[in-house]
Image: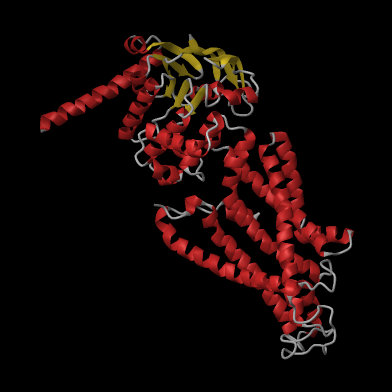
Amino acid sequence: MSLLEVAGLRVRPGDGRDLISDLSFTVDAGGRFGLIGESGSGKSLTALTIMGLLPPGMTASGSVTLDVPGMGRTEIVGAGERRLNRLRGRAASVVFQEPLTALDPLMRIGHQVAGPLRRIQGLRGRALREAVTAALEEVRLAEPGRIAKAYPHEISGGQRQRVAIAMAIACRPALLIADEPTTALDVTVQAEVLALLDGLVSAHSMALLFISHDLAVVSGITDHVLILKDGVAVESGAVLDVVNGPRHPYARELVDSARELDAALDGLNATDGGTR
Amino acid sequence: MSVEQAVIGAPEEDGAKTTPRHVSRSVTLTIGCVLVGVIVLVAVVSLFWVPFAPEDTSGRRLMPPGLPHLLGTDKLGRDLLTQLMIGARIALAAGAGSVLLGGVIGIAAGLAAGFATRWLDDVVSALLDILIAFPTLLLAMLVAATQAASLTSAIVAIGLAMSAIVARLTRVLVKRVLAQDFITASRTSGTSWPRVVIEHVLPNIWPTLSVNLALQFGLAVLAEASLSYLGLGAPPPNASWGRMLQEAQASVFIAPVGVIAPGVLIVVLVIGVNLIADGFRDVADPTRRRRR
C-alpha cells in the first residue's frame, strides 16, 4: 500500500515557468525514498507541496495523496487549510536543513517541543512535561532537563537538529520528510544525526522521504531514489540500480563525482598509510 | 524614519561583548526607573494629598520659594508645588493613554498589513506613509481643534498620530518574522495561523516593539506638553506642565522657578523613560542576555 502518492505534480509561480513539472513517485508505508538534486531543482518545493505549505503566489496542479491508516486518504492539492492542519504533524512532518532558523529563537526548547504534543495529543501539565523529557531523551540528548530550559542559541548545532527531529517525530507521523537534515552540520555530527534518524525511522516504522544533494548520503539511508534536475525527474529506481547503472547523463555525472570523491579519499588514505 | 531604522538596524552584539554592555544597560535601567519612579510617586501622592487646593488663589502672586508655599506661587497666587504634583498625573496619563491607544490600534493595523496580500498591503502602507508625513503635532492640533480641548482630546490626537508610526514598524517586523523558517517549521507540525501569531509572531516582534513603545511614551509626554502650551490640552484648573510653562513665561525674570520647575520635570520624565527603553531591550530579548 502506498502512503504517499505523487502523480503528475506541477508547481508554478504566478508568472509561468514550471518549477516542478510532471513529477510522479510513490512512498510505501515504512518505505524509504530519496530525492536528489542540486539547489533550485525543486526538492524543497516538493516537500512543502506535500505539507500543503507552498509559498504565496505558487500554485500546484496534479495530485498528491496521503493515505494514512486511521485518517483516510486525502488529496493535498487544493485541500482546505483546516483539513491540511489536521494532517500536519500526524500524517507527515518535516525536519529542515538549518536547525538554528527552524527553531523559534525566543522560545525555550521545552516549550517548542511541547507545542505539537499539546496540540495534537492533548497532553497537559505533568504528562506533557514527561512527554517532552521522553522526546528529548529519544533523540539521545544528554541532560534533557537543561536542554528543555535553554533557548536555541544556547545549545550546539547538532543538539539543535536533534531537537528539531524530536519535534518532528513527537506525534509519530506516518511520513517523515527530512529536507537536507545534515547539510548544515559538521561532518562528524552529520554521521551521528544520520544514524539517529535511521534508528528512529526503523523503531517507529515511519516512512522516510529523504531530500539531499548528496548521492552518497542518500544511498546510505534509502532504498529508492529519484533524481531531480530543474524540476524534472531524470532518473528513478532502486538505489543499487541507479548507482550501478545510471542512464541519464546528469545521473551519471552525480554517480561519477561521488565515486571520484571516494577514490580521492582512498588515495589519501593510501599515501597516508605509506608515509607512516 | 530615523527612529525605526535605529531600532531595526541595531546590530546584534556578539557574545564576547555582552557582559560589559549588560552591566551598563542594567545601570541605565536602574537610573531610568528611579527618575520615572519619583514622578509616579509624586503623581500617586497628589491623588491623596496636595499642599493647597489647585484652585486656591489666596496666596500672594508670584511669591518666591519659602513658607507656606514651598516653591512659591504663580501669577494668580496658586501654589506651584500643588500644580506641579497634579501636572505629574496629567503627564503620566497623557503618556500612558496615548501609548495604549496608539499601541493597540497600531499593532492591530500593523499585523493586518503584515499578513495582507500584496495589493492590500500596498494600500495600507501608502495610507500610513501619508499619515506619517503629517507632523504629529499638526495632526494632534487638528483633532484637538475639532472638539473642546481636554486631556482626552489630546490623548486621542497623540494616540492616533502614534498609531501610524507603530503600525508601520509592526508591519515591517511581522513581515520579517513571517519570512523566517521557524514559522514554516511550526506550520508543518499543524500550528494554525492564530496560534502562530500568539506563539511566534507577537513574542518575536515584542523586544523591538516594546522599546519603541517606551520611546513613544516619552514623545507623547512632550507632545502633550506642547499641546497644553498651545492651549489645546487639559483646561484649568487641571495643571499641565506645558500650560504652566506658557503661563509663567511672561514672568520668567521675576519668578524663574515657575518656568524652571515644570521644564525640569518634563526633562526628567522623558529622559527616565528613554533610559528605561534602552535598558529594556535586554530584558525583553533572551538572545541578548548573557550566554551560558
In the rendered image, residue A188, in percent from the top left (x then y), is placed at 30, 34
Picture layout, residue B244 above or below residue B220? below
Report the side of B198 relative to A183 (left or right): right
Q: Camera-side residue: A77 or B84?
A: B84
- Quadrant housing the C terminus of chain A: top left
- Which quadrant of the figure has residue B110? top right
In the rendered image, residue A268, in percent from the top left (x then y), is placed at 20, 28
Picture layout, residue B79 above or below residue B195? below
Answer yes or no: is residue A95 visible: no
Picture layout, residue B13 above or below residue B240? above
How many discs appear?
Answer: 0
Report the side of B206 relative to B95 (left or right): left
Report the side of A159 relative to A43 (left or right): left
In the rendered image, residue B38, in percent from the top left (x then y), is placed at 63, 73
- Which quadrant of the figure has residue A86? top right
Picture layout, residue A86 above or below residue B61? above
Q: Residue at x 58, y 16 (%)?
A: A10
| Residue farthest to the front, as pictured | A126
Q: Residue at x 41, y 46 (%)?
A: A154
Q: Camera-side residue: A216 or A220?
A: A220
Q: Camera-side residue: B240 or B162?
A: B240
In the rendered image, residue A175, in percent from the top left (x then y), is placed at 47, 20
Q: Residue at x 77, y 68 (%)?
A: B226
